[in-house]
Image (cartoon, helix red, strand yellow):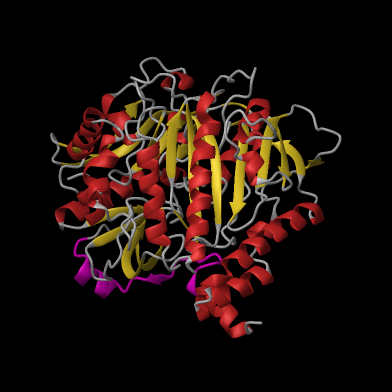
Amino acid sequence: MIDDVSRRGFLRTTAALAAIPVLLPADPAVAAQELPDFPTEVALYRSAYRNWVGEITADGLWACAPADPDQVVAAVNWAWRHGWRVRARGASHGWSPLTITRGTPSDAPVLLVDTASHLTGLSLESANSVRASTGVTLEALLTHLEGHGLGVTAAPAPGNLTLGGALAIDAHGTAVPARGEHRLPGHTYGSLSNLVLSLTAVVWDEASGAYVLRTYDRADADCAALLTHLGRSLVTEVVLRVGANSNLRCVSRTDIPAGELFAAPGDGGRTLASHLDRAGRVEAIWFAFTEFPWLKVWSVSPTRPLTSRHVTGPYNYPFSDNVPRPVAELVGRMVSDGAWYLAPVLGNAQYDVAALGLVTTLSADIWGPSRNTLLYLRPTTLRIATNGCAVLTSRAQVQRVVAEFTAFYRERLTAYADRGHFPVNGSLEIRVTGVDDPADVGSQGARTPLLSALRPRDDRPEWDTAVWLNILTLPGTPYAEAFLREIEQFMLRTFDGGYAMPRVEWSKGWAYTDEAAWSDDEMLDAVVPGSFGEDVWGQASGALDRLDPHGVFGNAFLDRLFR
């Protein structure tokens, strides 16, 4: 058994537990020297930056915490005049280098703008819309909506995400209409970006020769680029369309074998598609080297079913939110001793924890307002690296996508293991959503988010569904990048536009070489832009450049992506 010192070391090294950014109050003399003429009304400090898994870090960057949008503008104009770049920071819950890049030195001319400290306003705009500052967390937003009988169809599992960060990368949950289900007014089966009615962003104003706040209606052409801007802008406030809240039942199962759940179409049985038909909302978590996935199925249930436990708050899977000792010890041994061959043991331990935890916490069948079953992931969960892809297809082809992908995934995982290589020690996670239909917001002339992975294809109107595929593994796992490159290239070959096509999930890992993510030139130069179409990519890139012609909102990676 690994000793406690090594175990604690693992938890620190992999950021398995929640990390609080280090804030070092600014020395006025140093600040005056390094940031001359910085607006005195804006709180300034030194701060560390850590992304979700600690793979992208920087120590001692200058950061500020504006009290309101006007102070944001003041900080941005200072940065522009002094040749600095501005990076908005919310919860830092991401994997890809959209905020800062690896190797950013502490003396880099990069200013972090902390949105989460003060940009947290929330108020109802009307009976079916809410005005929200972008530093507010999704949990705070959903709690506010629930108090007024309002909600959303689907949301990401972590409640600590800031709204601005979620909108920047078209964050999503898992939901399509069940058979016979009709969309409620104010709801969407697409991304959260598709709920935006208007937004206020910091943009360049040629007339005044400075950056200013400007509000864009959903029908404005530039709004389409700002709805999913990838960090190439800074949005301070949005108005979201919302609808009546729903009570949801979430039933978890761990007794359906992967061979049945992910079977080829036509095989019958308890397939993923059959659960979609009945409930519309599913998530499968398949731990590596196990046979029985953890399947969650949400269904709209106005009244509590007799067997369901009524939950009055979110985060109802404590065994998942806190790293159990057996799992921590296994992971600690793998990381500290290089015992990556223990991946099958870890996979089975994670499955056992989930299967037992669902029973002992009475959480296998829960019911309550949507927030309480949609939010289930705390920052104290095991922090793990993940790739990400959305496969656009038709609803009728979902099971085919899942079957072909999981068959290849299983075959390659087995082939690697036969060679003594274990590139995956986490899980494969599968979710299914609709696409971003701008008609869902009920606003005349509403435009589709240009860079959302859920943007529909005009030439393929039958592609009304997206299958989200994520493979999770510990940071630093040998052969992981090579394995994920094989997976990525398989998806490009298999889902080649015949009946489906892939798009990257912005916040996760993609563009793999054998050594690293976000590094493959062909993906960056051709495949990723091509997945949206030359015209759409050009519109988005052109608009973002025009609204920020000095490149204040950017970094080296974004410069590379949009060159």
Residue 360: give x, y in percent of width and height.
Answer: 81, 56
Report the front residue among 353 and 538: 353
Q: Is residue 32 magenta?
A: yes
Q: In this image, 7 relative to 453: left or right?
A: right
Judged from this view, the residue extending furthest toward the top is: 444
Instruction: State the image coordinates of residue 143 (x, y, percent, origin top left).
Output: 62, 41
Image label count? 0
Q: Which residues are magenta?
A: 13-37
Residue lying at 64% horizontally and 58% vertically, measured from the top left? 321
- Relative to 317, does residue 219 appear above or below in the rendering? above
Q: Position of residue 390 (x, y in %)?
A: 44, 39
Q: Residue at x 54, y 67 (%)?
A: 16
Task: Please indicate whether residue 478 sits to the left or right of residue 251 in the image.
Answer: left
**Horizontal and vertical percent for residue 217?**
35, 25
State which quadrant residue 281 falls in. Answer: top right
Q: In the rendered structure, does residue 332 fall within the stretch colored magenta? A: no
